[in-house]
């Protein structure tokens, strides 16, 4: 068995069937699993199939790129079933100048994680941290204040989201 296959098997073993209160895989092990999944992307208005954490697609506006941010992956129970779910950040860049940040959550169905909901966090925001606390996704970010140019956000904020069926609701 190759080193890559062993790492993938170990990551899958760590992730599958572990309650949210037990030890969890590191962000990089989980990234290896999610990096080839199909995820909801709110700003894309579609689901996207990632290959090694990235994809490109063409629509009426031109070429778009979506990338999984490997630094911001969180795990914890989001739907009260006692199983470890995941929250990730997708960066979507289209033919214009913006870079849109999306919070996407994946819930466990049996042994697999499936994309459940996505919400747009903003254009050119800076995500400082992502975590799951007591069933809520907590995102600390820097956003544009009322007088900030799009390039240079300064307003620090903490947003909390709760999963409501197939939607993320801001608290």
Image (spheres, helix red, strand yellow):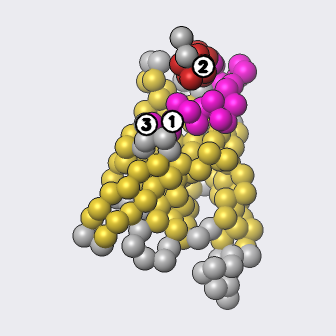
Residue 150 versus residue 163 in the image, above or below: below
Q: Residues within 10 Å of mark 1 (few under 14, many from 20)?
A: many
- Furthest toward the top, the residue is 1
Q: Are marks 3 and 1 in contact (CB under 8 Å)?
A: yes
Which span is picked out in magenta? Answer: 14-36
Residue position for label 2 = 3
Q: Secondary structure at mark 2?
A: helix
The span from disc 1 to disc 2 (Cα, nearest Å) is 19 Å
Residue position for label 3 = 37
Q: Position of residue 80 (x, y in %)?
A: 57, 28
Residue 62 in sight in this render: yes
Position of 70 with respect to 104 (left or right) is right
Q: Residue at x 27, y 64 (%)?
A: 59
In front of the other: 81 or 125? 125
In front of the other: 8 or 15? 8
Instruction: Give the mark toward the camera: 1 or 2.
Output: 2
The span from disc 2 to disc 3 (Cα, nearest Å) is 21 Å
- Furthest toward the left, the residue is 60
For the C terminus, the quadrant is bottom right
Residue 15 location, quadrant: top right
- How many numbered marks are there? 3
N-terminal-most mark, 1 or 2: 2
N-terminal-most mark, 2 or 3: 2
For the N terminus, the quadrant is top right
In front of the other: 98 or 104? 98
Position of 22 with respect to 168 (left or right) is right
Q: Secondary structure at mark 1?
A: helix
Residue 12 in sight in this render: no
Q: Position of residue 36 (x, y in %)?
A: 45, 36
Residue position for label 1 = 34
């Amino acid at each position: 068995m190759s080193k890559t296959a062993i790492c993938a098997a170990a990551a899958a073993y760590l992730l599958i069937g572990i309650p949210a209160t037990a030890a969890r895989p590191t962000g990089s092990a989980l990234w290896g699993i999610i990096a080839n999944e199909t995820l909801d992307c709110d700003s894309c208005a579609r689901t996207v199939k990632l290959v090694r954490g990235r994809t490109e697609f063409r629509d009426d506006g031109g070429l778009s790129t979506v990338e999984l941010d490997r630094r911001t992956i969180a795990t914890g129970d989001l739907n009260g079933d006692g199983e470890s779910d995941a929250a990730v950040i997708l960066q979507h860049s289209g033919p214009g100048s913006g870079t849109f940040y999306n919070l996407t959550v994946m819930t466990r169905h049996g042994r697999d994680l499936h994309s459940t909901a996505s919400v747009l966090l903003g254009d050119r925001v800076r995500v400082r941290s992502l975590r799951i606390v007591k069933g809520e996704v907590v995102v600390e970010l820097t956003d544009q204040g009322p007088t900030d140019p799009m390039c240079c956000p300064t307003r620090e904020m903490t947003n909390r989201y709760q999963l409501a069926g197939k939607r993320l609701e801001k608290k």
